[in-house]
Amino acid sequence: MKISRYTDGQILLLKGLGILFIVLHNFFHNIPPVLGENEFYFNSQLFGNYIYSLQQSPSEIIRYFFSIWGHYGVQIFIFISAYRLSLAYDAKHGTYKTLIKNRFKTLYVSFVICVFVYVLLGVLKSAIVDEQVLYWDSILWKLLLISNFIPGEAIKPVGPWWFIPFIFQFYLFFPIVHSGVKKFGNPLLIALSIAGLALEWSLVDKFDSINFTFLGHLPLICCGIWLSKKPSFTLKPWLILFAVAVFIGGHFSFYLWLVIDLAVIVIAIYFFELCINKLPQHFIGVKLLSLFGFISLHLFLVNGFLRSPFHNVAIGIDHWWGAVIMAIISLIFSTIFAFALMYLDKGVRTLFHLIINKAKDRHSA
């Protein structure tokens, strides 16, 4: 299977696939019975627990599927981030400083606006319920982008937001790697991947988990950079079979789990080429994936704290169809909210630029 360099449209579809996995995982994975997942830590018993639970309740297959595997949508985003940033830097559209500055402005401003909305909703909820809703210290650590280095704070106040400090730290780290690759080539990528595996092996249980930082994903980042250098590459049958074997084994062996991210990307690329990339552009499924890819940032930011009411209803129904229906309704609601946040984001930026321009005009006059 020969695969050409991904276009912007194809990357949008991959982002759509990734965000769907993430949102559905976030909804399903903590509906009782909560079985856990091998995301930041490894437990060889988990997969056996899933198989046993599925045998007891076969109708729960959708929920269990996304509970145990949906978090791998994050790996798709990490891979895409490394792939796209490497392409952008190679294209030399401005300096690296400009590229990183633009990404910080795009992502951080959106995050701050989302935090403001989250706090506003939290204040309103506090007036209704007699319990603590907002944890100001956790919000502060997240805004300072250092929560993944503070014990117990990585997934507070909103679980999925652990990714925000991670991606900013990745942006700061990237120029060192990319400049090194330019000078030393693929041997550096291999060395960094091995170093990353060694760090993850030795530090996976330290300061929460190294997997909350870019250091726990170095092989995946290096894979994205490596593939970005190739106009095309061939996905051979033996590699696909090997990836499937590693993926299966990674549920039972800690050492295979360390490289399961790479296996997931190989499988995801194969699935994308086999099932999605060949579909016509007017197909409704392709259009939906493109839409989710388009709003992936804002959908990622809001789905974590908007799911609660739908999640509670799903728990109350206590049946497989209740969880699935509530997950779909939650996805639709989060999608609408993500669009609203995106337009609010755009409006705030426009207003800010108008204020800055007026200030400059007054200063010039």
Image (cartoon, rainbow, N blue to C red):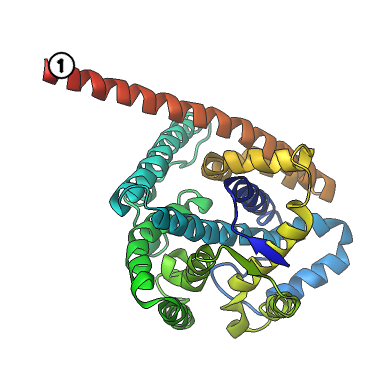
**Above or below, 10 relative to 214:** above
Quarter-wise, where is residue 312 in the image?
top right
Kindly identify the residue that appears in the image at 35 percent across and 49 percent down: 99
Determine which quarter of the picture holds residue 350: top left
Residue at the image position 64 percent from the left and 73 percent from the top: 263
The residue labelled by disc 1 is 362
Quarter of the C terminus within the rendering:
top left
- Viewer-closest of 345 and 6: 6
240 or 154: nearer the viewer: 240
User: In the visual, does 46 lie left or right of 118?
Assistant: right
Residue 115 lies, with reference to residue 82, above or below; the image says above
Q: Is residue 29 left or right of residue 304?
A: right
Where does the image place residue 172, in percent across and percent down from the top left?
33, 59
Q: Residues within 10 Å of mark 1 (few under 14, many from 20)?
A: few
Q: Position of residue 198 (x, y in %)?
A: 45, 83
Residue 53 in the figure: left or right of residue 111? right
Estimate the x, y position of residue 51 in percent, counting from the top left: 80, 71
In the picture, the quarter occupied by the N terminus is bottom right
Viewer-proximal residue among 218 and 182: 182
- Quick check: can you spot residue 34? no
Mark 1: amino acid: Arg
